Image (cartoon, rainbow, N blue to C red):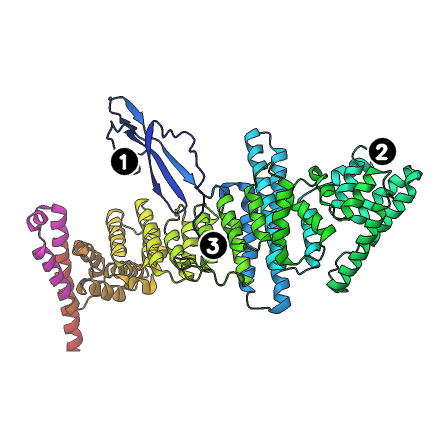
Amino acid sequence: MDEPDTEPPLVVVPGADPSARQLCFAWGPAEVLVCETLFGRAGESRSPCPCCCPALTGSVAGTGDGAPSSSRVFVVRRDQDIYIHTLRKLFNESHGIFMGLQRSEEELAGKSRKAQLVQVSKNYRSVIRACMEDMHQAAVSTRDPALQGQYSTQVSILSAMELIWNLCEILFVEAATAGPLLLRLLDWVRLHVCDVDSMVREVLSSESPSKHKLFWNVVDIFVLQGRMDEARHLLSKEASANPASMNMYKILDDLMKKMPVPSLGNTQTLTELELKWQHWHEECQRYLQDGTFASNPHMESICKILLGDEDAILEKKELMTTWYHFLVTRLLYSHPTVKPMELRFYAQSSMNLFLGGESSPEPLDMILMAAFEFEMHQVIKECSIVLSNWWFVAHLTDLLDHCKLLQSHNLYFGSNMREFLLLEYASGLFSHHSLWQLGVDYFDHCPEFGRVYLELHIERIPLSTEQKALKVLRICEQRQMHEQVRSICKIMAMKALRNSRLGSALSWSIRAKDAAFATLISDRFLKDYCEKGCFSDLDLIDNLGPSMLLSDRLTFLGKYREFHRLYGEKRFPEAARLLLTLMTAHIAPCSFWMTLLTDALPLLEQKEVIFSAEQTYELMRCLEDLTAGNPDKQKFQDDDVETTKVEMLRLALARNLARVIVKEGTVEGS
């Protein structure tokens, strides 16, 4: 896609005054951070700006003359629409349609595939229309003038979006051919351009409909939209009220009834239709030239419209309101078998005739003109510039890509147009606190850069709750995003540790497979045990399983807890062997050795001998290593409590050794 030919629109930031202060900005993934610097316009002050120096954000700093001045920060969002609550339906329901289209890509072919794509397009339009109706209801029900204006603006935008989408559906997706093309365009005009239902109700509910001031306006609108049956029904009211005009009515009614129109069933060829239409046209011309309707200007005007008289049609300009209504009416009565590639010529001349130099085309006019010229890339470009979000162009481009209409158009930086627009749309969704989940699926269906974008954006999601973190983690695990999995687990482990939730912190560190952090948390568990005399989060520690092999300290924590469990179950020999293993394997921290030796005391004092002579010697060696190898040996010796423990251990070990020798000697003697 080429760069925009025009300057981008000026964005006014409410509250910012660039004439008084210089502004600086920093780009984010989906928004811009704008802040006021403390640089005066003449450059007299040289204080840093908050964007460059975060410490000053929102603080009060001094200006050049010593007076305090606040520095404000503004967040400017490109996709502001995603924060409008009533548009949530548009984003959520269109996501389901998008995903269904991706899954069904290869299921059907030929006419079936085309019908499927047309149905997808209609589904998108139905979502737009439902959203528009919700927005209209919100505008009617609110009493806030500002909100009412905002909702009304959104209704206008959604209406324009549906208008453009419907035209693209006819020309590009359905690719209607000559004949059916005109019928589709008539339906398009009837649906979008002129709503006459309220006017019709007003006319028909009056005592004398043919005398109503809007009667002929309603008849003219029906004729301009090709709604012949309804126009004839109203004209019958006129004939009943004015018997003198009965003859003219019958002739006009007969002309309207016999008017040849294309059919969707292909029951007649275009040549047959053109011949019938030519005969009918000549009949209309003959009645007009004979002055059949000269006494009734309204009927004469209708006959001129049936003949495709451009001046007569343009006289009803106020009833049509738009040049594209004029285009379709003009085609209906002058060229009903128009071919798709001829539309561009009729569209351009119709716009020129309708506007007549009185006004210049609006952006919507240029988009529709590009569609009539079959410049779909220009349609997408203009919509990207004019519309306030990427939803429309992203989904329309994806649909056109599935129609195999954009295959040859790649962008200069590598990605094709479809992927570029989907990436932009999904990036906007990621700035929303809940819609980011939809963005994940859009990234998944961008084969070239989707994964890279997902990795970058998912790291920026605020992990405000553990539930949200688990949701993000599940998404990463499903896509084998191992680096992001580790990052999320580390962040959550650190948060839990700061909140003294050791069990949660240990669980997250194990999930992250972070041995260093698991060691740190294991040390905190052991420290808490030393201070409180019991373990917290026993369920987690009891069920570590193979996870305890992540680090030596975690292994020690798990095995030490197992020792306590064995001791509690009075399985003293097994508890003693495990305790000795923990001492001799050197996986216990040195600071914990005294605790382990102290835990051996109750086993040494049991009536039954638990430790063998060899095991007792090992415990003695460990005790001597502890007392001799302690760097704070003097402090250790001066601590009465520690000295008492050592003496009690030596005494218990000596007594146990004596009992073992007696027992083992007795056994050998026998």
Q: For the residue marked with disc 3, what is the amino acid?
A: Leu
Viewer-nearest residue: 649 or 259? 259
Residue 135: percent from left, percent from top = 60, 40
Residue 347: percent from left, percent from top = 62, 49
Q: For the residue marked with disc 2, what is the amino acid?
A: Lys
Q: Which mark is residue 211?
A: 2
User: Dot 1 surroundings within 10 Å: few (below 14), some, or many (20 or more)?
Assistant: few
**Is residue 256 visible in this depiction of the protein?**
no
Q: Is residue 642 left or right of residue 352?
A: left
Q: CA distance from mark 3 to mark 1?
A: 36 Å
Q: CA distance from mark 3 to mark 2?
A: 56 Å
In which quarter of the view is residue 567 placed? Answer: bottom left
Q: In this picture, which residue range is highlighted in magenta? A: 618-647
Decide: is 148 above or below 567: above
Q: Is residue 264 left or right of residue 247?
A: left
The residue indicated by pointer 1 is: 55
Magenta highlight: main SS: helix
On whether residue 643 falls in the magenta region, the answer is: yes
Q: Is residue 424 left or right of residue 360?
A: left
Decide: is 214 above or below 97: above
Viewer-nearest residue: 251 or 4? 251
Question: What residue do we see at 78% from left, 35% from top?
Answer: 214
Q: Is residue 300 left or right of residue 381?
A: right
Of labels 3 and 2, earlier in sequence is 2
Of labels 1 and 2, earlier in sequence is 1
| Closer to viewer: mark 3 or mark 2 | 2
Element under disc 3: helix
